[in-house]
Image (cartoon, coloured by chain):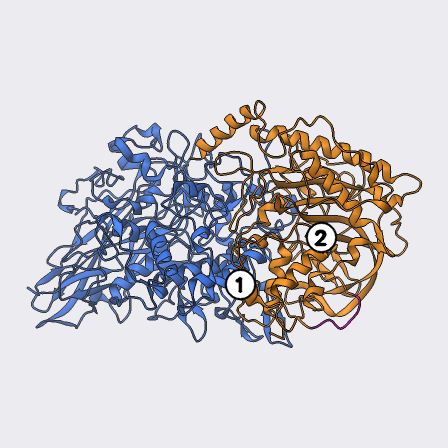
Amino acid sequence: MMNRIYLKAILGGVLLSLILTGQASAKQEETCPNIDISGWFPHSTTPEPDNVNFDSSTICNFQEWSWQMFLWLTQKSGDKPRFLSFESPYDLLGIENRSVMMPRTTEAESFDEFLQAGTDGILVDHNGNAVYYSQYLNEAYTKFIRDNFENDKNIIDPALIRGFSPDTPFPVGSIELKASWKIVEPGEDASEFYTMDASVYQLANSGGNIVVDTTKIRKVKLALVGFHIGGIVNGHPEMIWATFEHIKNTPSVPAKFEPTTIVSNKDFTFYKAGTPYSGCNVNYAGSPYLKLDEATQKLLPIVEGCLQYEYGNSAENDPILQASVEKNDKHIKTLNKIVRKHLQDPDEDKVWSNYREVGSIWFRPTNALKPDMTLATDFAPDGSQFLIGSLKLSNSTIETFTQYPASVNNCFRCHNTQQRFPPAASDGTHLLPLKPMKLNISYAFSNIYFWSQQLPQQ
Amino acid sequence: MVNSFFRVHPAINIGRVGNSKDYYIAPETAAGKLQDPSTGLFGGLPTQHGTEDTPIDSSDFRDAEEKVVRQAARYRIYAYDTGQDTYPSTDPGREVKIGDKIGDKEIVDIVWTVHLANKKNNAYTIESANGIDEGVVAYEDGHVPPIRNPEYGDELSNEERLKQLVIDAGPRAIKSSKGAASPVEFNATTACCHAEQSGKISEIPDYPVSFPSDYFEMYNYDGPIETLGQLQIESDTGRLIVTGGYGKVSGIKVNGKEPPLKDAVDNDGWFDDTSDGPVNAVIVFDDQTTSSVVGGWFSETDPGYAPQTRNVVSVWDDTFNTWVEELDLVPDLYSDGKYNPSYQVSFLGEVLPVFYAALLQRWNTNFASKAINGHNHMAQITFKDNPKVQIPNFKSLIRDPNVSEENDVGVKMPLALGDAMKRFLAVSKTQYFMLMQWFDGKCIEDEPAMGGGETLDRVVMENLLGGRYSPGIDLGFIVRDVHLFKVNWKGETGPFRINEEPLDYSKVRKGKPFLGVGYLPLRTAMVQPGDLGKFLSQPWHTDYNSCAIHQTDPNPNNDNTLYWSWPAQRPVQVFPASLCAYDVDKKVWNLGGQLYSIRGDNLGSDNLTHTDYPQKEGRYQEYTDYTANWHKVGFVIQGSQIKTEDGGNYGSKYFLEVASQFNPTPNGDPTGFWPTAAIPKSKD
């Protein structure tokens, strides 16, 4: 059967150049941007993308949406970028952090997330600090959750989630975000980063694991190094998944490589010049080699990071995918160049010009999201292309350790609509799983469901 | 005459190599089944030598000299008053020993005969000529794979091949009445003998005993192969105990030097000292009459490095599937070519062991928390729970063995490698049917009643690796072939009996090989000593070393993700007990991180297991280094069986590595978490 599918794929590839049917390939796309993007600038005036009237007909449209959304989210709103005013999943539940399911007691939220999703990996930077992560939900997202899942005591009720229609998607305009943050050491030059004063929970050795110490907070300056955007637009309840990185995070791995390949002769924030590929993205988590000095909060060994796919795609692909991949990467490269140049204008906050889009990924057909989709391949059951855009998209600071294995090397491999098994509850109770639903595309949603089962009020 | 039937149980039992003369008894409880709910102790642990059912603890894996203790197979005889026509038998039978009455007769002796041989070098290769491990398919339509050691003749029946390439220790007999006297050796200096039907033991002075060094100049690891094991009688019980070889490996020298050892499974000229063969007995009564006994089988294989870890698919599952679908074993479950949709499955017998098997995989693999959480959830499900609430998408989660397209779907469970041209492992069709019956509410809690003998038959096979026979670690793909078994099982014989060829030792001729080609899949030839093991690796060491993590095969889309070959029986990533830390305040032990089970000594490039290629992690990079160091590998055992001053033991929720002889400080490459992926080599 696989051979038959593969044959279909090859035939499809041949046909693709003749008949570009369906979404994102119906038009000739010779240039990108294909709209006048001067209206995005200055950054302070970038309008929110039109999610409701989003046009799915070209790949460029998705990359434009990604960049415009990044600009809008990072646009100063009050005294900080807009996304920092969004609620976190913890805010939605009114809890302090996931380790202690207690009501919020402090005004400011301390970051507690340092394990990467999927692999439990810890990205240890060159100063020995763990990279921390934070999540944000926009009002459309949080309103949907509150409207549908809060009970009469204004508490998220997991029973309401269990009874919810699995076919209902998030409303258009819903956004979830994940940011990665590097701790800035005193005296360290972070002028090229967006930075903010914040606090993180300290780390501690406990039970053979490295965990957050919910009793100790570390005041730090954080530098933004990575930024995930997941947003629902017209026709795409699966979300457009886009990711951005600081340009000096990591070098990109060449298309042809071996373990001995020197990925770059230059230093990067997470990479030491001359490190061979075999030294990149080594996951020390779960290993006795990984040590935390609780007093200094420093971890060893450090992780040398490399970006496996510069624009979220490999150079050579299945023939049916190749044309869209080449177009996608070309568009990202062009947009990055144009937008970053705008951001270097004297009137702009130049720090944002130091970030670039790695890529974005979405479904080729519109309104194709269903419950219980595995999204394990890039193809539909009939052999046609189903996923499109950056098909091997990862952020080197957020998915450091899953960039390469084909089974997990893009957003949808994990962000699917299968059921979710519950995590271990902090009090040892047996939580109930989450049934297959369209909403499961959002890990923030599944986390909210599991955390809601552990709230002391329940 | 007596009106009872007698059978050796278990029908098949497994010895395991060790370089110690000591032994423990093969497990008589099933891995993946909760043995003692009050303590949380899981089954699968071998029994301490000299005890009825005391499970071993962490101190029993090695002897006083730190050598690996062998696993012995213990056999009993059960008497049945009625012939069998159902499975399980309505007659549970009873174990009989010297002094027991059968009707008005008293048993005065049990005379056992066992014949051990190793035919690995006079067999066909595991890989077909097309380079594919096809399993039984390779023997279809009169075809066979290429022959091993073709330079010694191109037919397995070639007399020189039979004489030189088969290790044949011949038969040995022993009387239960002799008690725990000196063991009887399967070596060249101990006389071959067998039990006559009268119960008399007769020597066979002309038996053509054959060991490799009789014919070849051998390159030996840990000395020459001079024995295939021993027979002895268990004190007080009169049961038979069979111990096998010592893990030795020996190759025919090439130009006076060590021959190449480069392949994972087919290495011409290389012998190991594992073996297999029939276990027969004659019961002698006080009136000097005798009764024959339906025989069992002994087979020796790799050490049991993780005896409590059940594979999601065991040899039992594959064998049961074969018997259900092809030999009318349980008509209520399957008849007329289809499963009975009204069949009520046993939650404790058929469903929960699958969930527990999933739970236990984490101790031999590098699952991240997401997978661990899922498996933990499944293992917490009880009979009273609503399946559709606990695993809402169970039907799309479990790979359906009836749908060939699902062979290729890497997100379905179980997530391990398949065999015989299937990318991924699937539960057997019988397992799948029973799991879905549970999901649809057609389920009872308890297992059907089963006698002690039949329980032993099943338990042994539950502890063996099934599902992926490339070529397998305990028994091979032959368990899927009905020709391996006595198909007329009703009446005296009972199910799961090897289709043993009656060996007429009166036909022994000096200097002439006694054993022939024997059993081959899909053929009618009966099974001789050595015929089970010859479908396994030559020697076992190379396959054990190799079978850590691999890409799928076939791999049409060139998926670089690495999956486990044998995650239950071949630990890849382990949690050493020595790295655990005791929490004084909470009075509990905590895990201290993972290392590769096979991790060599020293760090980085000085470590013989080090590699920059993820697909080669967790093994020695040269097979010869594993053959020299196999006995250093540690064992995985439940924490409650590991004594310690702090807290008494490590607790039943952990399964930890003990008794590793690799350097005690953390060493080897870091394990990371699954998934890892293969890096292409420049020549690939």
Quick one: label 2, few (<14), some, or many (20+) residues within 10 Å? many
Quick one: label 1, few (<14), some, or many (20+) residues within 10 Å? some
Residue B391 within the magenta-colored segment of the rendering = no
Res B2 seen here: yes
Near-viewer residue (B300 or A405)? A405
Q: Position of residue B548 (x, y in %)?
A: 50, 47
Which numbered dot is residue A162? 1
**Chain B display color:** blue
Is the residue at mark 1 from the same chain as the one at mark 2? yes
Residue at 64% across, 63% down: A147
Q: Quadrant of residue A321?
A: top right
Res B634 seen here: no
- Dominant secondary structure of the residues highlighted in magenta in the image: loop
Answer with left or right where residue B42 lies relative to residue B633. Answer: left
Q: Which residue is mark 2?
A: A177
Q: Given the image, on which type of amino acid does mark 2 rest?
A: Leu
Shown in orange, the chain is A
Near-viewer residue (B77 or B675)? B675
Answer with left or right where residue B437 lies relative to residue A47. Answer: left
- Mark nearer the N terminus (1 vs 2): 1
Q: What is the CA distance from the residue labelled 1 to the residue labelled 2?
A: 24 Å
Residue B210 vs B380, above or below: the answer is above
Near-viewer residue (B304 or A262)? A262
Q: Position of residue B109 (x, y in %)?
A: 16, 66
Q: Which residues are magenta?
A: A103-108
Residue at 80% across, 69% down: A107
